[in-house]
Image (cartoon, grey):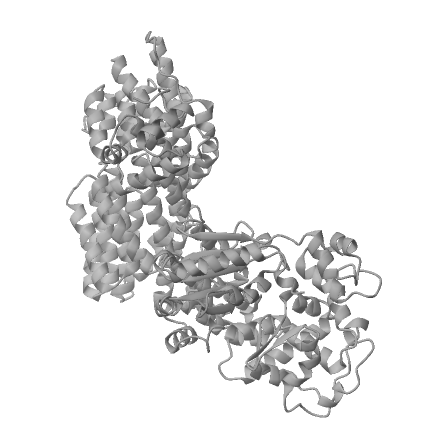
Amino acid sequence: MDWGILEREPELARLASAAREAADGAGSVVLVFGEAGIGKSSLVKALPDHLPDGTRILVGECDDLATRRPLGPFRDLIGSVGGELAGAVTEGGDRHRVHEALLEELRGAVLVVEDVHWADEASLDALRFLVRRMERLPALIVLTYRDDELSREHPLRHLLGQVSRAPRVHRLPLARLSLDAVRTLSAGRVDPAQVYAVTNGNPFFVAEIVAAGGTGRVPPTVVDAVLARLRGLPGATVDALEQLAVVPSAVERPLVDALLTDRASDLAAPQENGPLATGVSAPVDQHGPLTDGVSVLAAAEQRGLLTVTPERVAFRHELIRRAVADSLPAARRIGLNRAVLAALVARPGSDAARIVHHAAQAGDQDAIARYGPDAAKDAAATGAHREAAAQLRLVLRERHRYAPAELADLLERYAVESYTIADSAAAVAAQREAVALRRALGDTLALGADLRWLSRIHWWAGNADQAQEAAREAVAVLEHAGDDRLLALAVSNTAQLRMLSERYAEAVEHGERAIVLARKANDPAILAHALNNVGTARWRSGDPDGRAELEESLDVALAAGEVEHACRSYANIIWTLLDNLQYDEADTFLPPAMELADRAEHLGFLNYLHVELAMRRLAAADWDDAEKHAEYGMHDFIPARCPALTVLARIRIRRGCPGADDLLSEAWEIAVGTKELQRTGPVALARAESAWLRGDAKGVIEAAAPVHAQVSRLPGAPHRPELGYWLTKAGHRVPPDDSDHPYALQARGQWRRAAALWQAAGCPYEHAAALAESPDPAVKLEALAAFDTLGAEPAAHLLRVELRELGVRHVPRGPLAATRDNPAGLTDRQLQVIRLLAEGLTNAEIAARLVVSVRTIDNHVRAVLDKLDAPGRRQAAVRAAELGLLPGGSPT
C-alpha cells in the first residue's frame, strides 16, 4: 500500500486539472499546506503519474539552514533546466536575469517548490515575480508549506497575500488520515485504534510507527519510531546517517564522498543494537577511506530512510533527518558539523551560506568571521536581503575580530540590509554605531555619507526629529570635504525632509543648491532626486510650475535607468494629483508607475503605489477594490502603512463596519511621529468624519481643529478645505475659505456647485453628501438613494432621521437585515450594480455612475445574473427585490 497517496485522490485530481488548464494557457498557483508529516512531499512525488503525458515537472526544495541559500530551490533545478537559467542562478547577482530566465524556462512546465516556509528572500522575490505573471503564463506553480509554522511576521506571509489576489489560485489543505486509512496501513501488524490515538492520523507518524511495529507497544514519539528503524543497521551506516543528518538539505554526491570515510569492512557485521539505540556512538574505523562513500548507505536506503541518486543523497523525509540529528549528543553534533565545514572549505565554489551555517553549528567563530561577510554579499546580490541581514547579524557577534574601519563598513551594510527589510530598530542601532566609529576614525567623507544614511533610516522609521538632526550634521560635515557628489546627496536629502515637513521655501532653497551640485558632479540620480524635491515643494505650495520640475525629475530618472528615483517621482506626482482631485490625470500615471515598480521588483514603491491606487478607488467609492489595494500597504513600511490604515478605516466608517477606531489609533500614532501633514491630515479627516457620523460634534472639533490650525499657516495645504468643512458642520468658527474646492463651497452653503464638482470628479459618496445638504426634501431623497446604493449605512441613517424630522411621510426604508446578510452572496460592488440595474440603467450608464470601465460592469452584471440564477436583467431585478436587496423593495 502506498501510504503517501492514500486519501489524496481529490487533491491529485485538482492538481492534474490545474496542469491541464495551464497547458491550455490558463496558468495558476496551487498552495499545498498542512502540518509537518501531513504528506506534502508524498503528494508531490505522486504527482507526475497524474499529469498529462509529456508534462515537464521541475522540483526544487527549500532547506532548513540557519541562514538560507540564496535561490536555494532554483539551484536544485540545475541539470534539469537550460543553460541560461543555470548560469543566472549560479552567478546570482543579476536578479532581473534570474527572473526572466525563470519566466522563459517555466513556459509549459509545472514548477514545484517544496517547504517554501524555509525559502530565502531571493527565492520569495522570484516567486512573487512569477505569481504576478501566472495569469498570462502556460504554467503551473505548486508551493508546499507548513501553515502551522507561519507567524504573523513570517516572510512567506507577503507572498501568500499576493497569491491570494491572483486570478487563479487553488488551495489544497491536506487533512489527516481517517481511522479507516490507518486501519488499512496497519494491515494487522499493530492495533490501528492505538496508532490513530497516538498519531491523530498524521500520515508520517502513522507510517513510521507501523514500520517500527511488532514490538507490542507503540513508541511514544515519532523520534522513537525513527530510531527503532535504525536497530540492526551496521555501525558504519549509522555513523554515515548521523553525519548526513547534520546537513539540512539534500547532500550532493561529491560532499557525500568527502564525508563518508569509514571502512567498507565495517559493514560486514550488523549490530543487534545500533549506536542510536543505545545513545553511544560507534567507534570510528581508522583503516582509511572508502573508494565509494555512498555504498555505506545501501542498508539505510533499503530500510526506506534515504533516497539515493547518482547526483545526491537525501533523507526520505525531513522529519527523519531531524529525528536522527536531534538524537545526537551535543558534542557529537558539533564534531559532525566540523567535518562538514572542513569538507565545504576544501571544495572550491562552495556556498558561503552553507559554510557559515556549519561554522555556527560547530562553534567555529573564525570561519564565521572569515566567510560571513561574503555570504552576506552573495545574499544581497541576489536580493535575499533578509538572509544578508541574518548573515551580518551573525558576523557582528564577533565584532572584536575586525578593525574599526572594517567594522564600520559591516555595520553600515547591516543597517542598509535591515532598512531594506523594514527592521527599523536594527537599522537605526547599527547605523548609529557606524557613525560613531566613523567619527572616531576621523574619516570625513565616510562620516558624511553615513550621517546621510542615518537621516534616511530615521525617516523610514518615522522619527522626524532625528532624521532632521542627522541631515543637518551630514551637510555640515561634507560642506568643505571636497566631494560634490556626496554633498549634493546630503543637501538633496535635507531638501526632501523640508518638503515632507511642509517647509516648502526651505525645501526649494536646499533643492536648488543640490541641483547645481548634482549637475556639477554629473550625477543624474541625485539630479532627479533634487528636482523631485523642488518640484513637489513648489506644486504643493500652490505654484503650478512645480509640476513641470517634478515631471522633469521623472524624465531624468527614466532616461538614466534610476528606477527608485523614477518610482518616487511617480509617487509624488500621483499623490499631489489625488490631493488636488485630479483623478483622471492620476489614472494616466498609475499604470506606468506600477508597471515600472513591478518590472523592477521594487516592492516598497510597488506597495506604496498600490496604496495610492486604494486612495483613488476610495474616491470612486469602489470600496472593495480600495480595500484590496490598501492591504498591500499593511506591512512595516511606515510611509505606506499609515495611509493604508487610513483608507481601510475610512471605508469601515462609511460602511458602518466595526474596527475603524483601532485602525485610526495606530495611524494617528504613526502620523504624529512623522510630523508630516500628508500623514496627520488624512487621519484627522477620517476621525472627524467618524465623529460626525456618530453624532459627536465635540469629537469632530477635537479631531480637526489642531490640524486645521496648522494647515491654515501654510500656502496651498490640500486638507484645509475639508478640515474647515467638518469644523463648520460641528459649529466651530474658522476663517473663511474662498477657494473653489467643493468642500469650501459646501462650508459656504453652495451645495449645488459642490455636488456638480464632485460628480465631475467621479466621487459618488461625496456627491451624495453634497446633495444631502440641500434644503429640498426631493434632493435629499435622491441623496438617500445614492447612499443606499453605495451601502453607506451611517450616512443614510442620519439622512433618514433628518427627513423624518422635516415631516417627510414616505421615507424609503433602508436595506433589510437580509440585505446585510446577503443571501445571494453578492459582493458590495455587485449590490451596487444590481440596484442600478433595477433602476433601468444600461451597463454604460452604470459604469459612468460608479466611475469604472464598461467592461468591468459587464463582468459584474454576468456575475450578478449567475448568483441570482436569473436569465436576464428584468428577472434579476425581480429576484433582488424578493430577497430585499433593493432600497425601494421592488424594481421599476
Residue 19 on image: x %, y % = 45, 61
Look at the image and tell me whether residue 621 can be seen.
yes
Task: Tell me which corner region of the image, top left, top right, bottom left or bottom right, holds residue 290.
Answer: bottom right
Residue 674 on image: x %, y % = 39, 43
Task: Tell me which corner region of the image, top left, top right, bottom left or bottom right, holds residue 104.
Answer: bottom left
The C terminus is located in which quarter? top left
Farthest front residue in view:
871
> Closer to the camera, 548 or 852?
852
> Closer to the camera, 86 or 448?
86
Task: Tell me which corner region of the image, top left, top right, bottom left or bottom right, holds residue 545.
Answer: top left
The N terminus is located in which quarter? bottom right
Asked if 195 appears above or below 808 in the picture, the reply is: below
Residue at horizontal 35%, vertical 9%?
805
Would residue 303 be found to the left or right of residue 742 on screen?
Answer: right
Residue at horizontal 34%, vertical 8%?
809
Residue 800 on image: x %, y % = 36, 16
Residue at horizontal 81%, vertical 72%?
278
Asked if 86 appears above or below 410 in the picture, the reply is: below
The total of numbered circles placed on residues is 0
Look at the image and tell me whether residue 70 can be seen.
no
Would residue 241 be found to the left or right of residue 660 on screen?
Answer: right
Residue 169 on image: x %, y % = 45, 52
